[in-house]
Every structure is written in structure tokens, then in C-alpha cells.
Image (cartoon, rainbow, N blue to C red):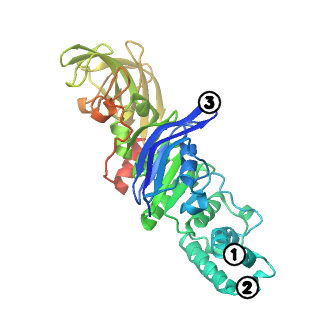
Amino acid sequence: MASIHMNDISKSFGEVNVLEGINLEIRDGEFLSLLGASGCGKSTLLRIISGLETQSGGSLRIGGRDVTGISPKNRSVSMVFQSYALYPHLTVFQNMAVPLTMRLLSRPQRLPLVGRFIGGTARIKTEIKARVEALAESLDIKHLLDRKPAQLSGGQRQRVALGRAMVREPEVFLMDEPLSNLDTKMRAHMRTELAELHRKLGTTFVYVTHDQEEAMTMSDRVAVMMQGRIMQVDTPRNIYSRPAHLRVAEFIGAPGINILPRTVTSPGVMDVCGVKLSAPSFVRDRGSIGIRPSRLTVTPKADDAWPARVVNVEDLGSSFLVHAVLADDTRTISRLDSRAAIPEVGAAIHLSCRSDSVIHFDADGWNPALHEARQGSRRLETAVRPTREERHALAHAL
């Protein structure tokens, strides 16, 4: 196991800056996800950790050792690619044995005809066979060892790719969107398997994905990346409920967060779309507020409620999404429990939320409630590891 320390990592391709000033510490044995849209630099950062790319600036340490300029094979990391990268002409056993064969057998010992006559070859091959079979059994693919990749399902190929990475017993696992080629049901199944595998191994996992549900339900912490920078690093729960920036809040959550403009009209009072609400002491001047759809509820008429008109209702089975328009044409989404009274399209309603459900953003988009965010910190974090129950609750909220 090993921690990873990145200090001011940058990467440029010609005049294009892909990564700018990445400072990140990944703890020993942690499951950390790099989450962001396509083109934000997350895969490039993973390739720098693996040694497949060299940073333009900054330093990288794995397990306390500076690995800048160190080749991938000497970094004690294993990488699982999006395409699995299995050799189609080799069996499952041979694919999983490749890392050990390359590491433990010399070039002459690997020769098909003369290798068997070199001293020690038989003993090493027996050791390789035992390690591969033991790992295959733990991954429930031992019965597939004689098959080739074309004869496997997507989930089975994924397990083979994981097994090939695990057989080296690396200090760090790197995964570049490994579930993106699977169907929805298999992805949900593999998310559970990966989380359980991490708990079993206790090894450092770095996982790249653009899928927020994958990141939020598997990770100990999530690093949200945008345009080559890390906007926030924190637990999934805090990323969702205490986003450091407006862009993070809008990126996380489906359906998206409701953003309403606000103006402080007097000390302790703010105007939000025509409704006067109390404002905390740290809120000043103009900005906006964010309200998650599950926290914006239909209520009786009140001074602190927004009058609205329902424009659409979506039935999700366990809940309903109520799309409404406020008096100033601001659009909102409310997630209502299926047991609640659901208004019809065209109905006039009132919407409100509890004051502790409001997330404040200043004119620059930062959350003024987070002091480090005001200073542009990229390391908003906590050491609390989410429980399985918290992961399930968060998955439902998303």
C-alpha cells in the first residue's frame, strides 16, 4: 500500500495547458475518484501517476518515493483501462499470467522451446500457476481460465482485467473508466464488487470517471476536476451537500440543483425571486442560492414561499419530479415522494425549503460558508469514511 502526493503538477501539449497546478494527497489505502466531464484532464492525471505520461512541471511521490522520471514498471502500480486491453489470442489464464511471466522469468526462460530446459523455469511457472488460480478463484472466474476474451461477457472481461492488475500485488490500482462499456445492470453490480474488493484488499485505488453515481457511491473521497484544475476534494456527502463552488453544485446531482438569484437588501435579509428570506451573516451583496430538488417542497401559501406554476410532472416510480416556473420565469425542479399529493400540470402551487437546506454562493460562485473555498483552496476534505448505509442513501438522493 502507498500514499500519493502531487505537488503543483502541470501538463501541456504544445500551447494547450491540460493540467494546471494540481496539488493532491491520496491517502494510503484510500479509494479516491477523479470526477469530471470529458476533456477536464482526469485521464491525463491518471496516466502521469502511472508513468505513461510525464508531467511538464511539479513533482509526484508514491509511497514517499519521488517517481518523477521512473518507468511505469518500477512504480508498483497497476492500471485497468477502459477497453480492458486483453490479448485476444491468449486465454484468461495467459492474460492474467502476463505480468508475472514478464517479471519472474528471464527472456531466455520465456522462449517456448528452450526455456523449459533452463534451471528454475519449472518452479517459477508452478508458482505463477498457483498465484493465478488462487486469484481467479477469489474473483469467481476460475472456471473461465481456458477461455479466450471473445468468449466472455463484459462483466467477465472486466474481472479478468482486474485480475491481471491484481496479480502483481501493486501498491496502487489505477482505473480509467473501467465500467463505461458495461450495460446499466452490470455497471451497478460491478460498482458493488469494486467497493467490496477495495475493502478486502485495503490497497490504494485511484478511479477516473465522468459518472457521478460511480464516484459518489464507491469512493472514500472525490476530487472534482474542471478545465485542468481540481475544484474540490471531499467526501461524497460533503461534495453533494457542501459544494465549494457553484460549478461543483451544478455538476453533482441528477436532477440538477435549483439555482435562484439573490440580493441582500438589508442586514440579515435577502430577496430571492421576489420573496424575502433571512440571510446568514456571511452572505453579502449579490449572489445566488442553491436548493436540491429533494429539499424544495410544495407547501401552503406563506410569506416565505414562492408562488409557481407547474409545467411538467415526471413519474419515476418511487418519486415524482415536479417542474415549475416562478413568477420571474425562473425554472425549478422538486422531487416529491410518491406518497405525497402530486399537483397536476398547470396547477398554481407554492414552493419553500428549510433555511438549513440552502447553499449560498457569492458573486464569483464560491460558497462563503467554507472559509478555505473563499481562499481558492483545492483541498476541502475530511477524514470521515462514508458507511455503506450513507453510500446507499446518497445514491438514492442522486
Image quadrant where residue 257 sits: top left
* Mark toward the start of the polypeptide (1 vs 2): 1
Q: CA distance from mark 1 to mark 3?
A: 43 Å
Q: CA distance from mark 1 to mark 2?
A: 10 Å
Residue ID at (35%, 44%):
237
Residue ID at (42%, 14%):
329
Residue 259 at x, y percent in the picture? 39, 24
Q: Point out which mark residue 15 bears.
A: 3
Task: Tell me whether the residue at label 1 lies in contact with that at label 2, contact meaning CB atoms closer than 8 angstroms.
Answer: yes
Residue ID at (56%, 44%):
55
Q: Is residue 24 above or below residue 100?
A: above
Q: Secondary structure at mark 3?
A: loop
Residue 225 at x, y percent in the picture? 48, 38
Q: In the depicted view, which residue is nearer to us: 206 or 138?
A: 206
Q: Secondary structure at mark 2?
A: loop
Dot 2, crowdedness within 10 Å: few (<14), some or many (≥20)?
A: few
* Mark toward the start of the polypeptide (3 vs 2): 3
Label 1 sits on residue = 106
Q: Point out which mark residue 118 bears.
A: 2
Q: CA distance from mark 3 to mark 2?
A: 52 Å
Callout 2 amino acid: Ile
Image quadrant where residue 359 sits: top left
Q: Secondary structure at mark 1?
A: loop
Residue ID at (46%, 28%):
313
